[in-house]
Amino acid sequence: MVTLGPIGIAASGLAADHPDAEIDLARKAEAAGYSTVWLAGGQGNNLPVIDRVVRATERIQVASGILSVDVVPAREVARAYADLEKAAPGRFVVGLGGAHGPRPLRTLNSYLDDLDGPDSPAGDGHGDAGAPVVPATSRVLAALGPAVLALARDRAAGAYPYLVTPEYVEQARATLGPGAALAVLLTVVPETDPATARAAATAGLSFLRTVPGYHRNFLRMGFTDSEIADLDTRFVDAVTAWGDLDTIVTRIGEYHTAGADQVVLRLSGEAEYFERWLRRFAEALLP
């Protein structure tokens, strides 16, 4: 079963012209004591990046946040997982999601069937004998709604939601039960000016207009259509963390208290700014 430490770091805002940016970040996060580095999948296949980062570090977990099941074939994920299990056992956490077609649950279930392998109870028995598998204990799902949370409970090690409140986390924990892993991706903005902080927090949220699952989840959390569309201050403040260091640390604690095993800090900014806050949060949050 995936065991997550209390604080992870998300690779975001990295220099596109720096081919080893993810490796540099992972090494710094490992040295600072972070448990996990989550590498964004974007719209492509970042398995080669994951492979390089795992092999270039010693202890830190490297999680895909996330690999899109609509883009990356299950066989490629299983092969990469098998290779890394030989080289660095237990260090690649397979984060999956991105099923945006008309039947997302069916798509996810079918993909998980493939990862289970041909000899699993869900398999058809006609696949290649000895084909690589990714066990449920090594994968997490980018889950928001109750149906996918239940799938994460039943067919994965846990869930990885984004843009959620502590109240949502409490409900998600109730659905997942006590044994599943729950990692929450949280945008953090170390900025005390409200206008500046909220502008930074919402800078990358244009995708919300094209992913209906997020909109439905915001409605379930009690926000109105207009609050979501306008990125209202009540909405922004509820799903992000901004302010001085003590304020953000307190906010992270609310997610842990609500049931999150790991809070994954999503920082952005120039390299010097990023690294300074990477260290400051480590000093404040890690033993």
Image (tube, rainbow, N blue to C red):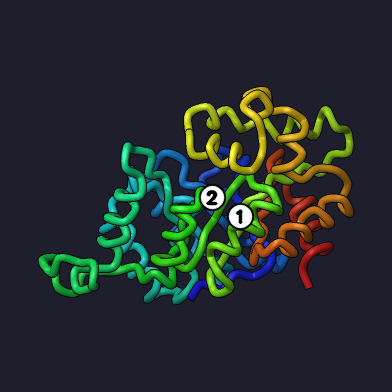
- Which residue is the site of mark 1? 24
Q: Is residue 192 left or right of residue 70?
A: right
Q: Position of residue 264 (x, y in %)?
A: 65, 56
Q: Is residue 204 above or below residue 98?
A: above
Q: Position of residue 44 (x, y in %)?
A: 39, 41
Label 2 secondary element? loop
- Residue in the picture at 74% in, 46% down: 188
Mark 2 vs 1: CB contact within 8 A: yes
Q: Quadrant of residue 117?
A: bottom left
- Depth check: give the residue in front, 212 or 95: 212
The label shown at residue 236 is none
Label 1 secondary element? helix
Task: Mark yes or no: residue 9 visible.
Answer: no
Q: Position of residue 80 (x, y in %)?
A: 34, 62
- Near mark 1 (Cα within 10 A), the count class, few <14, some 14-19 or many ≥20, is some
Q: Is residue 86 left or right of residue 259?
A: left
Q: Is residue 38 left or right of residue 74?
A: right
Q: Amino acid at mark 2?
A: Asp
Q: Amino acid at mark 1?
A: Asp
Q: Is residue 254 left or right of residue 123?
A: right
Q: Quadrant of residue 183?
A: bottom right
Q: Is residue 17 above or below residue 120?
A: above
- Residue in the picture at 56% in, 51% down: 161
Task: Mark yes or no: residue 146 visible.
Answer: yes
Mark pair 2, 1: CA separation: 6 Å
- Which residue is the site of mark 2? 20
- Depth check: give the residue in front, 111 or 268: 111
- Residue in the picture at 43% in, 72% down: 137
Q: Quadrant of residue 155?
A: bottom left
